[in-house]
Image (cartoon, grey):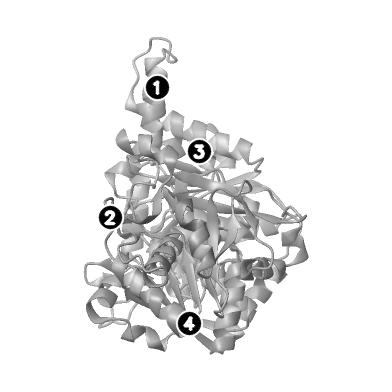
Amino acid sequence: MSSVGKGVAAASIANILKSKGYAVSNIKCDMYINIDAGTIRPTEHGEVFVGEDGVEADQDLGNYERFTGNPVTRVNYITTGQVYQEVIRKERNLEYGGEDVEVVPDIPNEIIRRIKLAGKTDKAEIVVIEFGGTVGEYQVLLFLEAARMMKLESPKDVLFAIVSYLPIPEMIGEMKTKPTQYAVRTLNSAGIQPDFIIARAARPLDEKRREKLGIFCNISKDDVVSAPDVKSIYEIPINFEKEGLGERILEKFGLKARHKDLKEWAAMVNKYKAAKRPVKIGVVGKYFATGDFCLSDSYISVIEAVKHACTANNCTPVFCWVNTADIEKNGTGALKQFDGIIVPQGWGSRGAEGKIATIEYCRKNKVPYFGLCYGMQMAVIEFARNVLGYKDANSEEVNPKTTNPVIHIMPEQKELIAKKQYGGTIRLGGWPCKIVPGTHLESAYAKAPADKKAGWKAGKDMIVSERHRHRYEFNNKYREEMQKMGLTIAGTSPDGLIVEAVEIKDHPFFIGTQFHPEYISRPLDPHPLFVEFIRVCLEKK
């Protein structure tokens, strides 16, 4: 089933192999026809993660970066849409030399080419490839065929692991292996025998279940890996190591560990688990509802960045998801319980007024506020309405007819929108940001460890690199007026034209960034803006 933990399993395996001295790369293969994840709504497929080169990818690529520290790019993300698009392009250009082009073997061959390209580009010795979806789905068959062909071509260089869930029905109280047996048989029908079974369950696997899976799935019981629920996903590599997974993988590849060191990782996990002081963070967004259930995966990078910052501050996060529709309907009373509030990314007009009301509450009541991308834009609108007095101030995205578009479309985007060229056309990926001296933003970045600051450009102005995903921006027509009234421009593009961050000085923490600092936060390297936000939340608390 989906969401069982394939992404963190793949990230954890890469983490372990890297700790043993090997250069590792991760790839996510998604089955949908979309070229990338950029046009998929978050409630359908979770957060869209943006790589340094601007790739809009599945949220699992964020886990790959957080677990390994390796930056991901376009080569680390493969979709069915990309594969078919390239095969058709080659056919139109006569690159198949007049042969008829067939689904098999030409589609699997293109998948294999892309997998090998990623390994070569990343200079990897071992490539960890995750197939999205589930083994019984029609759309995964061509990827399984590619995997089978790779194994056939080079039997000693390809291993398979299946991540499968073992339910424990509440009224029965016994862990059941039959669904996993059936999943493995389905995989066998595609010509693939797994080398490992990663047995996900609420509780650790017992010896009887391990033996049963070994017998009925044609696998050594030592290659059945127990993967119980844990408090933090960052415990998973440590649990896998206890099961000997890394050593077993290297043994099957005929390789030896060059060194073994998860000490820093284990220390971080222990610090996270030991933290007792709670800090209550409200995340006010509009991508939570999925039927009768709540989908926090829409903001997974934000959530993880807060966790990283809490570990750095020796506290534990308590998250509350607040739907903007509830704020619009019931007012801001529910916000009184929080030590700090985050308004994350978003698109369109729905829920905008709830976010603006939230920001007004934070500004007036001195509640630590962190606005990310859309959250910065809504902060500018709130300031224009309630401080400058422009009651109709808005974003052109929300109200194209507003007479005070304090947030407007980026000039180069107008033509693209007119042509309905939406996919992959917005301002994406890593861009430099000049930090204005004397701002809260600067002091937060200045507290970062020396090795992190080594990658920034020093001088009169600090220059940092942050990732972006937006089509609208601060309207410079209102810049001077807003600054006079107390809104500080805290970060800009190096030429000073694009406003990258705003803040309010007479406030414990009121910062909005056009960029997404959450994308580059790591458990071993938390982002300084999140670290400062949580520090102030604790201080204010």
Q: Given contact means CB atoms under 8 Å apart, are the residues at marks 3 and 4 in contact?
A: no
Of tags 1 and 3, which is closer to the observer?
1
Between 148 and 262, the one lying in front of the other is 262
Amino acid under disc 3: Lys
Give the percent coordinates (x, y) of residue 333: 32, 86
- Identify the disc placed on residue 89: 1
Q: Secondary structure at mark 2?
A: loop
Amino acid under disc 1: Arg
Q: Which residue is mark 3?
A: 151
Q: Which residue is mark 4?
A: 367
Instruction: Please determine whether, in this image, residue 359 is positioned above or below residue 479.
Output: below
Q: Give the Cα separation between the discs numbered 3 and 2.
A: 55 Å
Q: Give the Cα separation between the discs numbered 2 and 4.
A: 28 Å
Q: Give the Cα separation between the discs numbered 3 and 4.
A: 57 Å
Amino acid under disc 2: Asn
Give the percent coordinates (x, y) of residue 464: 66, 55
Q: Residues within 10 Å of mark 4 (few under 14, many from 20)?
A: many
Q: Earlier in the sequence, mark 3 or mark 2?
A: 3
Q: Which residue is mark 2?
A: 399
